[in-house]
Structures are given as C-alpha cells and as structure tokens.
Image (cartoon, helix red, strand yellow):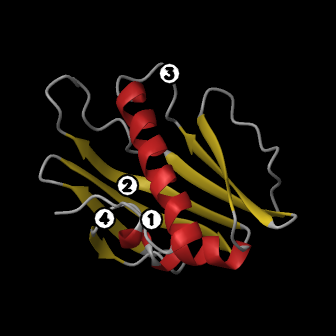
Amino acid sequence: MKTMNTDHVGSYIHIIEANTTTDRVYQALTHEIPLWWTEVFEGASSQIGSVFTIRFGDQIHKTMRVKELIANTEVVWLVEDSLIALPELKNQREWIGTTIVWEIEQNNNMTKLKLTHIGLNPDIECYEICSGGWLQFLGSLKKFLETGHGTPYKK
C-alpha cells in the first residue's frame, strides 16, 4: 500500500479534505465521475483494465485506462489518449502517457484525498490551464462528496 507521502517531484499534486468516508470517495472515483467531473462520459471506470473517455465539448477529451484499484485506498489511471484543442496550445496532446494517482486516507472524521498527476508539471505547455481545471473539478468533487451535488461540465 502506498502512503500519502509518495513523492513525485515536479508532478501536479493537490490535496483536498472532505467531510465524508473513504468508501464514499472511492465510489465517486470508480462509479460516479459524471456527477462531479463531466456528464460526457463513455466507458467504465470501476475495474482494473476498464477504459473510459471524458469530454468537455468537441475540443477537449481524455481517454484513460484504470491501472490500479485498492478499495477505499487508491485509484490509478493511465492517460492513453488526450486532446486539448485550444488555439493557445501548440502541443494539444500533452496528457498522453501521464498517470493520475488518487490516494484516499481517513483522517479522524474527514477523508483526505491526494491527487498526483504524474507528468503534469510546470514545464509543459498546458500546466496553467490544466492545473486550473483540476482546481475547478476537485472543488466540484469535494462539493459532491459533502452535499451529493457536484458541478460537473455539462453538455
């Protein structure tokens, strides 16, 4: 089992704490992505080897493979395809080959969720846009976990 102290120098890391349980967080990451990230969701995210695609309009999509699942503890996705077709980005496929690691830990009556996006770092072109996107949707995830209602991207 990995711990919250896993160090990925230069990777995007953000921690949120939510007034919820570890199993609730795990459920949100494996079965309820459309309720907090984007309603435009295809595929499945609940088993190792599952592949899912999320879309934000016609210009942005990401396809991920579930690489690791440890119930109520860890979820790992590998980005297999990605397009961020924004005119300000020259390299619109920077997410391909990056890894998204979610580490879940009970902390008294709160649950700590650590997101590490390995490969998303200040040296890549989309860092500012993408880290801003993560902040937006992590806020939605926290809201969803605490109230049952997130603010996902809508069609």
Mark 2 element type: strand
Residue topped by disc 2: 80
Residue 108, x across and y down, in percent: 88, 64
Residue topped by disc 4: 53
First in sequence: mark 4 or mark 1? 4
Q: Is residue 85 left or right of residue 69?
A: left
Q: CA distance from mark 1 to mark 3?
A: 24 Å
User: In the image, is residue 80 above or below residue 85?
Assistant: below
Q: Nearer the viewer, mark 4 or mark 2?
A: 4
Q: CA distance from mark 3 to mark 2?
A: 21 Å
The crowding category of the residue bearing disc 3, from other C-alpha atoms within 10 Å (few below 14, some 14 to 19, many at least 20), is few
Mark 1 element type: strand
Tags 2 and 1 in contact by the CB under 8 Å rule? Answer: yes
User: In the image, is residue 79 above or below residue 84?
Assistant: below
Residue 122 is marked as 3
Q: CA distance from mark 4 to mark 1?
A: 9 Å
Q: Residue at x 45, y 75 (%)?
A: 45
First in sequence: mark 3 or mark 2? 2
The crowding category of the residue bearing disc 1, from other C-alpha atoms within 10 Å (few below 14, some 14 to 19, many at least 20), is many
Q: CA distance from mark 3 to mark 4?
A: 25 Å
- Residue type, label 3: Pro
Residue 44, x across and y down, in percent: 39, 78
